[in-house]
Amino acid sequence: MVTRLRLTDWPNRVSWLILAVFLIAVAALTKTEPKSWNDRSHIAAIESFVERGTWAIEGSPWQDQTLDKVLLNGRFYSDKMPLLSLVGAGAYAILHYGLGGSLAPHCSHVSHLCAYRFLTFGLVGIPAALMLWLFFDFARRSAVPPWAALLGTVALGVGTMIFPYALVFNHHLPAAVSLFASFYLLTTRRASNRWGLMAAGFLATLALSFDALAGVMTASLFAIALIRYRSRVGFMLAGAAIPLALTALLDYQITQTIFPPYLIPNGFAYPGSASPPTVGGNAAPDDYAVYAFRMFVGGRGLFAYNPLLLFALAGAMSVVRRRKHPLRIEALCVLFGFILQSLYLVTNTRDLGGAGYGERWFVSAIPLLFAFIFFAPPLNAPTWKTAGWILFIPLLGLSVFSSLQGAQAPWHAWLPPVQMIRFREAPNVIGIRWNVKFP
């Protein structure tokens, strides 16, 4: 029996095609070994827990190759939130004891299976691909035309920091996936019953348990739930308690408190530490205005690497201004959360996220903000005949170029393709520098 492909079926088939193509690309390009303090810190914790039964990273071959660590009670630990490391340890235990996998440097010399690539693909790459599937479905459920839903999803997948950070082990992208999955449940009304709300709460605080900076956007999701599902928000809180309880238990094993290693100031007070002994190991910048300039439009500018986020911001503000828009509350909460996170980073950090592609501290917030790109020109136009494409198309090209450049080496401090600069001889004069080149 032959079935005919109906025209109305193609959006569903496209969503699966997006998932498959992104998975293939990530599987092909996932890095084979940790290259930064960030992922070496995670890998040291995972390797130590599985092979030595302790969260202390002393004895790990990665201990001396990362400064993302804290000294507590005379022992070194990863300074990362521990829940993602626990999940990674479960996966690595299967690879290590079942298949002989290894996380050692030069693992190919001691094992027939190097586990880093498999861990990264399984815990970062696959969830990122599933998030894109949800993103496309969110757009379709928001009455976005199929062509606009497809273009917006592709732009998120390969025109932002999502793709580069899907190729390395990090906590930012799993947090982004969890936040958007929670947002998806809340906005598509999948959280209209108790189980949906519990899942939304679980995912929201799971993001916080992966990435402390995701807490601001987590609060935004709870604000949405409080307004939309006021009488049943207790179910969301019940779901939220699970990751928080697990994190508190893991924190106690490491710090003897319910606070994660990242938030113990004295943990960074050891000889050779790269961080000041403060909460999070952060310090305020010397010049707030200059630092903000660099963070948003300059050499490490969020909007310089990801200019399409300007359209997303415009879409969110457009939705907020329309009192009867069904996503007005969601846009308001996400915008407010994004502004709060920006203010915190501008006033309490000074190294722009360290070595790496783009302003990676914003990775967790990007999909939530990007969801509103469909409500600004040109993606909200009824036809292709709109002047918005004159700006959108070149910025899309620059965004994709930048993302693919970052995918070559995500922990390399690439310059954005176009950045704003302040001239040394005339600090009050601002110009534009083009960096569209490969090494």
Image (tube, rainbow, N blue to C red):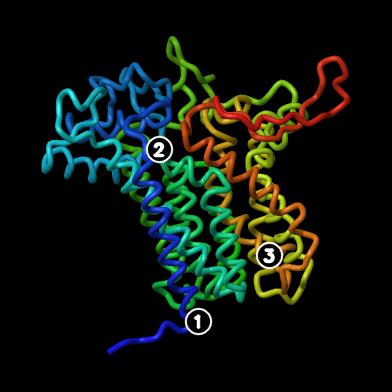
Sooner in the amino-acid sequence: mark 2 or mark 1: 1
As drawn, the residue found furthest toward the front would be 2
Tell me whether the residue at label 2 lies in contact with that at label 1, contact meaning CB atoms closer than 8 angstroms: no
Q: Amino acid at mark 3?
A: Leu
Q: Residue at x 80, y 24 (%)?
A: 422
The crowd level at tag 1 (other Cα within 10 Å; few <14, some 14-19, many 20+) is few
As drawn, the residue found furthest toward the bottom would be 1
Q: Residue at x 33, y 49 (%)?
A: 246
Of 1 and 186, nearer the camera is 1
> Is residue 103 rendered to the left or right of residue 387?
left
Q: Nearer the viewer, mark 2 or mark 1?
A: 1
Q: Which mark is residue 270?
A: none
Q: Mark 1: which secondary structure? A: helix
Q: Amino acid at mark 1?
A: Leu
> Is residue 42 rendered to the left or right of residue 60?
right
The crowd level at tag 3 (other Cα within 10 Å; few <14, some 14-19, many 20+) is many
Q: Which residue is mark 1?
A: 7
Sooner in the amino-acid sequence: mark 3 or mark 2: 2
Q: Position of residue 267 (x, y in %)?
A: 43, 23
Instruction: Let me know if residue 230 appears in the view.
Output: no
Q: Mark 3: which secondary structure? A: loop
Task: Give me the C-alpha separation between circle 3 and circle 2.
Answer: 31 Å
Q: Which residue is mark 2?
A: 168
Q: Nearer the viewer, mark 3 or mark 1?
A: 1
Quadrant the N terminus occupies: bottom left
Of 21 and 304, nearer the camera is 21
Task: Give me the C-alpha separation between circle 2 and circle 1.
Answer: 38 Å
Instruction: Let me know if residue 59 appears in the view.
Output: yes
Q: Which residue is mark 3?
A: 379
Task: Give me the C-alpha separation between circle 3 and circle 1.
Answer: 21 Å
Q: Residue at x 62, y 55 (%)?
A: 369
Quadrant the C terminus occupies: top right
